[in-house]
Image: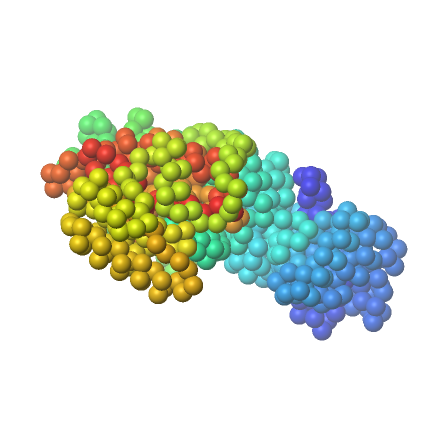
Amino acid sequence: MSADTVRALLNPTSIALVGASEDSMWATSFFSNLTKWNYPGRLHMVNPRRDQVYGQKAYASVEAIPEPVDHALIVVRAALVPAVLEDCGRAGVRGATIVASGFNEEGAEGSKLADQVLTVARRYGIEATGPNCYGFVNFEASIVLSRNYLESMPTKPGRISMVFQSGQLNQSACSSAEQRDIGLRYSVSSGNELVTDANDYFEFFLEDEGTSVIGGALEQIPDPRRFERVAHRALELGKPIVLLKLGTSEAASKVAASHTGAVTGDAAVVEAYLRELGVIVVSDIDRLVETAGLLDRQGWPEGGRTVFAGTSGGAGEYFADLADGTSIEFTDYRPETRTELAEIIRTTEDRVLNPLDMTATGGGELVAVTSALTKRDDFDVLILMAEELRSVDVQGERAVKVITHFNSVADDLRKRGVYALLASPIDRTVTPLGREVRAKHPVTYLHGSVGVEALHHAISYGTDRQQKLERVAAIIESRGVSVTQTSARGGAWSEVESKAFLRANGIAVTRDIQASSEDEALAAANELGYPVVLKLESPHVAHKSEIGGVVVGIRTGAELIEARRGILARAAEAYPGQSFDSVLVCEQITGATELIVGAIVDPDLGPVIMVGAGGIYVEVMKDAALSLPPVDPEIAERMVRSLKTWPILAGARGKKPADLEALKKLLVATSDMVVSLGDQLSELDINPVFVSPDRVVAGDALIVTK
């Protein structure tokens, strides 16, 4: 789909409201919004049972309308939609909004209807929003083809374009933007995306000169490979993508044998996927809107060095607490700056801190304070504390003048190229007075923790953008690597088979000997040297420890025979009808830290490499780091250092540090295996990986192929 076809879909010059009726809450909501907000095009009513609707002539069909119509707003039940769309196609309509639910989400009958709609749409070249949607708003053109309740339009349209697969979240985002006086450009409720999907809208927004920031909330990504190209193009153009964290995919439920899915959870896989692509991931609607609004109005700073100045020491401390652990860095003043500030606010130099408490005296010298701060290149971000304006009745005339002055100073700094912001400790709806002052001084407010997180994202986007651009290019390139044919069969590999594959790919594994009899087991233990570990060896049992299929610390032949008989008996009891006689006699490694390394293969997004705290308590610890392949040594080190387990690996309490270089090589080799296996891979689980100062070795492995 081309950008022009989506542009036409979202910019209709004439609309037929099919299913128009005063008795329909939905139809009435759409009609009221279109008329209330002065839709600039022609609006036609279609109802075969009435001559008039909403005081206008009603036509029996779209085809009966005596002039061209380029968009049909279809507000009829699902069963009627295919016939209505056929009527639209004959009438030359090329865009539609399908409101009804009852399609793919409703089982076999709904899927049949969906197929019919898609067939008709393709036959006539109709692009469509929905079905099961709230419509869309084009703020620039005053086209409120939506059931959203809008109390007011923004002071001026913004450059933020968003897509929501949930109609309610679309409405909530519009309300949040309205409360913050943040202007949107497009807000689309895409629904089931039967014809036109999120990637189509995103690609249009990328080419739309009026869009600077792309956002939304997606329950699923319709085509992940295509989305990866969208993300790469967005980084190239400097158009940040901000998305509300997706809901859960089916990764955890489908990764039945591997520990990795249970360790991280499927939502973590989705979040890791998006972050690796340079997407800014947020946790709620207000953070989505505030982050997008900051990026739209002010772009991003060159770095995170920040100065905070206000008339309350407590507010500064509060902001600093909120910023702890983010990319916001409270920089030190130069000595000459500290001296100058002390003179301006009439205090001693030891009280000139960052965050800066200007006190009431310094607040009256705001221009002098900001001039002193901006004389030298000491920071990237300047934040002034200022409450949102309420009214003269509430705050008093003097307070209103002071806050307006802060707005004016921040606006002047912004015009001079300073990344200057205002900060309020709380989140409040912008009042008419606030909108009036913002119209004169269009500065950006940060609201409490929501605003601090928005600034963190803006800083990170600016500092990481080039690195992310190169990373996404590498990810896309890895998708095209030719797949190595590894096995004629699918299913779970035994530990012996899995370890052989690891060994062939440069990963060290424990010394193991397979034994099918007691005599072979005894000979193997003598060759390896006691103590040894005994394991069940069978492709039918993915997690041997869960059925008592692993015994450690075996020191004598008698213990070995007893352990072998017990393992085989427990396996036969757990898996009736299966035959078990093979065990692995393995070297026992002590004094090492146990990790898990593997790949979570999401059915839609593809593989994600994982490293985390391992061993038998892996699912309890849930300490993991994720990254898309390919993983290079730098990414591998970053993953390992992010673990809660890292201080132990680094040599806590005087212990020797683990062999980080060998661990990085294992992660890189695992990533290379995953890339080479491509779509053949279902699961890859190396657990435990024994990590010690002098070696890194895989103790067990499970590979499942399709």
Whether residue 670 is situated above or below residue 623 in the rendered picture: above
Quarter of the image with the N terminus in it? top right
Q: Report x, y in % for residue 527.
A: 22, 39
Whether residue 248 is situated above or below residue 504 in the rendered picture: below
The residue shown at (15%, 49%) is 555
In this rendered view, identify the residue nearer to me: 71 or 193. 193
Residue reaching furthest to the left? 654
The residue shown at (76%, 65%) is 80
Residue reaching furthest to the bottom? 23
Residue 327 seen: no
State the image quarter where residue 595 is shown: top left
The residue shown at (35%, 65%) is 573
Residue 701 seen: yes
Q: Report x, y in % for residue 405.
A: 38, 43
The residue shown at (58%, 62%) is 149
Left or right: residue 69 compared with residue 257: right
Left or right: residue 54 compared with residue 657: right
